[in-house]
Amino acid sequence: MTMTWNVTPERYDTSEATALRRDYYDEVASRYWGRPATAREIDEGLTGDGVERLAPPTGEFVVGRYDGAAAACAGLRVRNPDTAELTRVYVRPAFRGTGGGGLLLAAIETAARGFGVKRIRLDTRNDLVEAQALYARHGYAEVPAFSNGPYAEHWFAKSL
């Protein structure tokens, strides 16, 4: 039996999308702090994080399922008529190495084209080396800094 990925738009606040967003924040916060994030820290990190912009008409949220199991997510936030930002790209550890990351990016790029966007950009941290490699493999090039957030250490962009 062949296991397959299916990536589709989904509201960011469904139970599975919410669980994926929590797992994403848990991993990036835990890696940053060098210790496991607490449930309270995860709750605080997700409060007021702008996730509501990851829904039409200002964006999109996609969930990837591997053989039916919610395994990955990514978000797109439209910044202006030509540019959108890729955010919250996450594949649960058990599903890494199965092609899900590339499929998330393809789904987000399709959504961006649907919004008429010509370019996708993102920022990421030094320690998220797997993410940096994923973006580079899929045609995202490092560009000069376009933001100055506390977690922005590498900036990437791709023309569509």
Image (cartoon, helix red, strand yellow):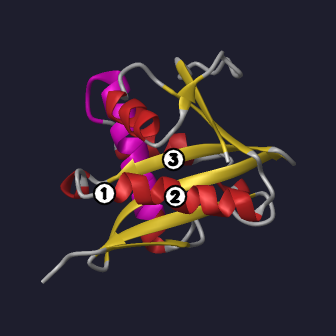
Tag 3 secondary structure: strand
The residue lying at 36 percent from left, 72 percent from top is: 65
Label 3 neighbour load within 10 Å: few <14, some 14-19, many 20+: some
On-image quarter of the N terminus: bottom left
The first of marks 2 and 3 along the sequence is 3
- The image shows residue 59 at horizontal and vertical percentages of 72, 58
Q: What amino acid type is highlighted by mark number 1?
A: Gly
Magenta range: 18-36
Tag 1 secondary structure: loop
Q: Quadrant of residue 19?
A: bottom left
Q: Which mark is residue 88?
A: 3
- The image shows residue 44 at horizontal and vertical percentages of 52, 41
Q: Quadrant of residue 134?
A: top left
Q: For mark 2, what is the residue?
A: 106
The first of marks 1 and 3 along the sequence is 3
Estimate the spatial distance between the alpha carbons at disc 2 and disc 3, rounded to whole Å. Answer: 15 Å
**Eyeballing the image, is 6 above or below 71?**
below
Farthest-out residue, left: 1
Q: For mark 1, what is the residue?
A: 99
**Eyeballing the image, is 19 above or below 96?**
below
Foreground: disc 2 or disc 3: 2
